[in-house]
Amino acid sequence: MKTVLITGGNKGIGWALSKAFLALDYKVIAIARDFKDFAYADKVECITYDLTNVEGIPALVESLGKINILINNAGLMYSLPYDCYPQEKINTMLKLNLEAPIKLIEACVKAGATRIVNNASIAGQIGHPDVWYGISKAGLINATKSFAKIFEAKVIINAVAASPVDTDMQKVNTAERKEAFKKSVITGRFATPDEVAKAMVWLATESPEYINGTTIDVNNGSYMR
């Protein structure tokens, strides 16, 4: 049985990822700060851990045994103006959205991972109101490209860049921003967690090795290129 490690695997896109990999008969290990009301707690190996503790990640991964697939899904957004951003929140943002995924990539490759998928964002491709969120996701996209070259096809690593998804993260967005976004997409709605998860599962399991170092857009026409 193959093992997949999913960060933030307890809710939103992570919940959909856990569900999808269980359906494919994978051993699922999920890392999150808590697993309150997690529907798959009896089927998933739940690891309670704060990923902003970047220094502890190598030891944590080593304790889990062999990992076949890493899904870097955990992330946060504060949706604050650039000139009202406390340094503490900047530090937390960069640790969780960028430093932790990179440290997990390094550790999971040592643990045997041959497929990695990073949950980036359209925010890393366009100008974004939350400047630090956009910076963190742009960094994750660049890290995806860099590691693909470094690993030289021994590890296939890709990312998805979704536009806003109907998850708890939308609680920090204003009603005006939500409505403006819905007007910018073809179907007039947010993506669902399942839609993004399906793209990530495909990259983790079935996509050809020639798709490597790539970021797949999941944005319903809101950023055509």
Image (tube, rainbow, N blue to C red):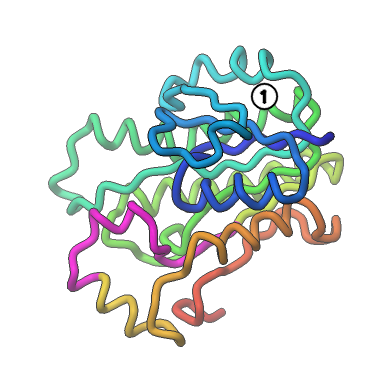
Badge 1: residue crowd in 10 Å (few <14, some 14–19, many ≥20)? many
The image quadrant where one finds the C terminus is: bottom right
In the displayed structure, 171 sits above or below 225; it is above
Question: Does residue 132 appear left or right of residue 121 in this picture?
Answer: left
Give the quarter of the image for residue 202: bottom right
Residue nearer the viewer, 205 or 223: 205
x and y, in percent, of residue 191 in the image: 46, 69
Question: Does residue 194 appear left or right of residue 189 in this picture?
Answer: right
User: Residue drawn 38% across and 54% down?
Assistant: 134
x and y, in percent, of residue 138 in the image: 48, 53
Question: Does residue 195 appear left or right of residue 4 in this picture?
Answer: left
x and y, in percent, of residue 5 in the image: 65, 34
The image quadrant where one finds the N terminus is: top right
User: Residue drawn 39% across and 63% down?
Assistant: 166
Secondary element under disc 1, as helix, strand or loop, is: helix
Question: Does residue 180 appear left or right of residue 47 in this picture?
Answer: left
In magenta, the rendered stretch is: 160-177
User: Residue drawn 64% across and 61% down?
Assistant: 198
User: Residue drawn 60% across and 38% down?
Assistant: 6
x and y, in percent, of residue 199 in the image: 65, 62
For label 1, the residue is 107
- The residue type indicated by label 1 comes to Ala
Count of numbered marks: 1
- Magenta stretch contains residue 165: yes
In the displayed structure, 138 sits above or below 179; it is above
